[in-house]
């Protein structure tokens, strides 16, 4: 629901206020505060301002990364260190984040998470605490960010279900995600998503009702995002634990390290990127025998969507890839039963291998899946999409192709690159290119590239099919 309040001129109403953080952020050093206030290129203020405004517009649905600042051009945020602790000063903030002059508690908590993660990651990088040059160092960085955010919970049996899917989905698909979330919640599962609307909100909403029926307390609705995507996918209001990872690769690693099973609902290129990320890891020889339940599901109206995904995956990566996922159509109860059985296998495997329940250390993630991919026109054209490569390496480059399209669709730097230089070009083995083009055209026709109701979608890519 979009509940944006308007002033007398018809523009979005704003509020200026100085607030006390709602727990978890008591002390910052003078240096940290100075960097948060520094508006220069070397400071963190621009990043803080972008992420904070996304949180303050929680619940609004849109996919224009610049739309927020067009609505609230005079918004600003400052973090102040005072004798009695931290204060957050908001200028011209969205009025919808306040009730009777007081900031909504949940939004306050998410705002604290923004400041916490930006300060922590920046400080660790400045001190050289993160070694981002090899796979072990990157995994430890992901672990430390999650631990600092208090996301990792020891001494809890595996129960965290990661739900992937698109922000632009039909009403039938959204209602189905709620039904699956409800079935999971009745069985004591916590939910983790990308924190936005659509298929990221639905499972959480369904689970909240089920958790209430079961009188279950201390429920976790974890949202994992990153600075490049948060402006286009503001956190939905149900998220009660938010963590901002430095980039998409660390975000994806956080999902697969934390989660005990993954459910994929219908989506667009971002969902395809996530699928290829996980399948590429599971196809790596080092991960043979590691149980990782992966379920594709949607209502009966979405059956063709998963047929298209399955066809593309089999063509590009071989029929054997289908051994790593299960497709369940229009049956939330069957999905929940498959999740329970899959998590039981995960639990037994972790016990046998002395691995932690809260972080999957044993999963091998090649550095090709961890290194940030900057989707420039040159980098997109250079992707080696050919079947004469190891399957996990091909999956890594296919993932990068979809990641580039995501950037061109909803990330500010990607949108600007397309405006300046035209569409990205994607080249590779002709048969795969033709299949990719068919898949992307289906996404466009099904309105999975852009939220319906706005201007028509203009592709940010060109697939070279001959």
Image: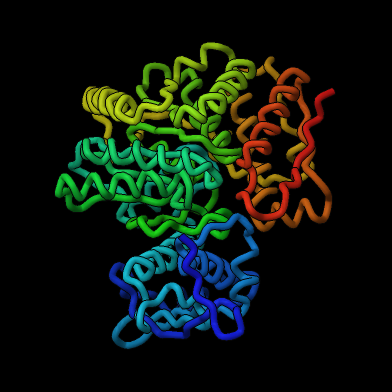
Residue at (53% x, 47% y) in the render: 167
Q: Is residue 427 left or right of residue 73?
A: right
Q: How is the image coloured?
A: rainbow
**Which image quadrant is residue 390 in?**
top right
Is residue 353 at all visible to an observer of this figure? Answer: no
Q: Which residue, as the protein is rendered here, is positioned at the far left? A: 215
The image quadrant of residue 102 is bottom left
Q: Position of residue 396 (x, y in %)?
A: 60, 30
Front-lying residue, 130 or 361? 361
- The foreground one among 125 and 274 is 274
Side of 364 where 315 appears, left or right: right
In the image, residue 106 lies at what x, y percent? Answer: 34, 66
Residue at (51%, 30%) from the top-left corner? Answer: 301
* Quadrant into which the C terminus falls: top right
> Relative to residue 7, is residue 42 depicted above or below?
above
For residue 369, say whether it is visible. Answer: yes
Q: Residue at x 72, y 47 (%)?
A: 457
Q: Position of residue 213 (x, y in %)?
A: 18, 47
Question: Where is residue 101 shown, x and y percent of the image?
Answer: 37, 84
Q: From the viewer's side, name the closer residue of 65 and 86.
A: 65
Question: In the visual, does 232 lie left or right of 117?
Answer: right
Q: Residue furthest top?
A: 319
Left or right relative to 334: residue 351:
left
- Considering every residue shown, the one lying at the far bottom of the view is 83
How many numbered dots are placed on residues in this image?
A: 0
């Amino acid at each position: 629901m979009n509940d944006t309040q308007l002033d007398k001129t018809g523009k979005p109403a704003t509020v200026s206020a100085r607030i006390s953080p709602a727990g978890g952020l008591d002390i910052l050093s003078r240096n940290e505060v100075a960097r948060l206030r520094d508006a220069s290129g070397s400071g963190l203020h621009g990043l803080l301002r972008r992420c904070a405004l996304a949180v303050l517009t929680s619940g609004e649905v849109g996919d224009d990364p610049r739309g927020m600042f067009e609505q609230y051009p005079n918004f600003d945020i400052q973090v102040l260190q005072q004798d009695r602790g931290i204060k957050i000063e908001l200028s011209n903030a969205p009025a919808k984040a306040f009730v009777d002059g007081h900031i909504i508690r949940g939004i306050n908590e998410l705002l604290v998470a923004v400041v916490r993660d930006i300060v922590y990651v920046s400080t660790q990088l400045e001190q050289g605490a993160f070694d981002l040059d090899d796979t072990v160092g990157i995994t430890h960085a992901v672990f430390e960010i999650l631990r600092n955010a208090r996301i990792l919970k020891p001494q809890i049996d595996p129960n965290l279900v990661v739900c992937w899917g698109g922000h632009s989905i039909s009403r039938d698909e959204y209602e189905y995600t709620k039904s699956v979330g409800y079935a999971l919640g009745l069985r004591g599962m916590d939910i983790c998503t990308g924190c936005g609307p659509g298929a990221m909100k639905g499972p959480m909403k369904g689970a909240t009702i089920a958790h209430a029926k079961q009188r279950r307390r201390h429920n976790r609705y974890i949202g994992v995002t990153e600075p490049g995507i948060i402006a286009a996918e503001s956190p939905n209001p149900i998220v009660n634990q938010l963590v901002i990872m430095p980039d998409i690769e660390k975000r994806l690693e956080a999902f697969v390290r934390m989660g005990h099973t993954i459910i994929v609902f219908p989506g667009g290129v971002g969902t395809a990127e996530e699928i290829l990320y996980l399948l590429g890891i599971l196809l790596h020889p080092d991960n043979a025998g590691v149980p990782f339940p992966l379920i594709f599901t949607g209502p009966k109206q979405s059956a063709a969507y998963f047929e298209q995904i399955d066809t593309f995956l089999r063509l590009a990566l071989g029929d054997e890839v289908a051994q790593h996922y299960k497709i369940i159509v229009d049956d939330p109860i069957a999905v929940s039963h498959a999740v329970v059985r899959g998590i039981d296998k995960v639990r037994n495997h972790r016990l046998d291998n002395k691995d932690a329940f809260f972080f999957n250390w044993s999963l091998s993630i090649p550095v090709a899946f961890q290194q940030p991919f900057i989707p420039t026109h040159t980098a997109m054209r250079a992707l080696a999409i050919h079947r004469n490569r190891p399957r996990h390496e091909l999956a890594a480059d296919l993932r990068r192709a979809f990641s580039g399209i995501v950037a061109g669709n909803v990330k500010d730097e990607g949108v600007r690159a397309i405006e300046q230089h035209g569409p990205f070009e994607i080249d590779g083995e002709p048969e795969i290119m033709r299949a990719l083009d068919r898949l992307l055209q289906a996404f466009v026709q099904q309105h999975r590239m852009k939220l319906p109701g706005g201007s028509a979608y203009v592709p940010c890519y060109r697939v070279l099919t001959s």
